[in-house]
Amino acid sequence: MDVSRGQEVSTSKDRMLRPSYDATVAVKVAGDQPKNKQSLDYVLKTGLAGGLAGCAAKTIVGPLDRVKILFQASNPQFAKYTGSWFGVVTAMRDINRQDGLRGLFRGHSATLLRIFPYAAIKFLAYEQIRSIMIPTPTHETPLRRLLSGSLAGMTSVFITYPLEVIRVRLAFETKRDSRSSLRRICNQIYHEQPSSSGLASSSTSSSSNIPLANAAVAATTPRSGLINFYRGFSPTLAGMLPYAGMSFLTHDTAGDWLRLPALAPYTTLPNPNTNKNNSSTSKSTTSPQPILRYWAELLAGGFAGL
């Protein structure tokens, strides 16, 4: 009895001082398991990271975005700069001279109000849709990546498009004495009524049919309401589907290229969980994708933006 008890004590001491092989394998396998993308923690972190990334990017290019809107809308005050190579710089200089730094960021508050939920929803939707369409690495194809990005872009632009309409309206204003507040802009857009005279005058019918055309247009076109915040939504959506799909596809493909064995020592972070003594154990488990360094991730995002 004493001998058996001594053997049990020594065995228990050995187990306490030296973890078993099975325990090491269990820890290794648990560490390599992918994250649960449907968990609330992952959803919140993904949305917050996407929203902050979008706000940072829009803040950096805010002055260029303001000038772009003025050029695209053929603003009379800045139409003279559109034909010059240095027109963007000259326009930014004139805006800064007239209104200061705040003039370059005119409408930026509405931009951030729109871009945070837009980027958050887009990245969050992409991760969720991707986890459904690409449940395992064997299902990963360029087409599935493209469809995941397109659906994510469609979801985000549908929810945040009214904020884009408000942002463009604020950025288009250039006169200092006629600037409108965010609340006033929303009221104007909500109560605006479409003009039917242009449609009627462009008709090839006789003048006697113009009142009938005006009545038909007035009967079929909403006079005011939330529909005004979705003006131009159809062409925007048509452009967003290929844009978002190609953007995410290019980002993921560029990330795969940067993780190639020839570039991985320079573009990826070292894995702290790598254990040379457990090389045989690591072969039996599936290791996650190596994490790109910040400049490599920025490079992949830059290619996606092109």
Image (cartoon, grey):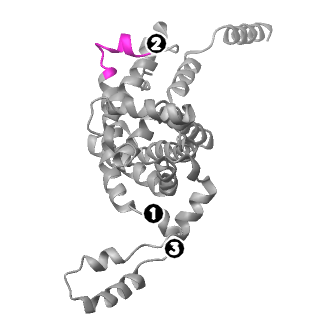
Dot 3 lies on which element? Answer: loop
Mark 2 = which residue? 270
Residue at the limit of the structure toward the right, as seen here: 2
Marks 3,1: beta carbons within 8 A: no
Mark 3 = which residue? 224
Dot 1 lies on which element? Answer: helix
Say if residue 57 shows up in the picture: yes
Residue stretch in magenta = 258-269
Residue at x 50% of width, y 35% of height: 104
Q: Rounded to the nearest whole Å, what is the CA distance between mark 3 and mark 1? A: 11 Å
Residue at the limit of the structure toward the left, as seen here: 204
Single out the mark in the foreground, 3 or 1. 3
Dot 2 lies on which element? Answer: loop
Residue at x 48% of width, y 30% of height: 60
Amino acid type, residue under disc 1 in the picture? Tyr
Q: Rounded to the nearest whole Å, what is the CA distance between mark 2 and mark 1? A: 47 Å
Mark 1 = which residue? 230
Amino acid type, residue under disc 2 in the picture? Pro
Residue at the limit of the structure toward the bottom, as seen here: 208
Amino acid type, residue under disc 3 in the picture? Ser
The quadrant holding residue 245 is: top left
Q: Quadrant of the C terminus?
A: top left
Say if residue 179 shows up in the picture: no
**Up/down of 233 relative to 48, above or below:** below
Residue at x 42% of width, y 21% of height: 292
Q: How many C-alpha atoms fall within 10 Å of the one at disc 3: few (<14), some, or many (≥20)?
A: some
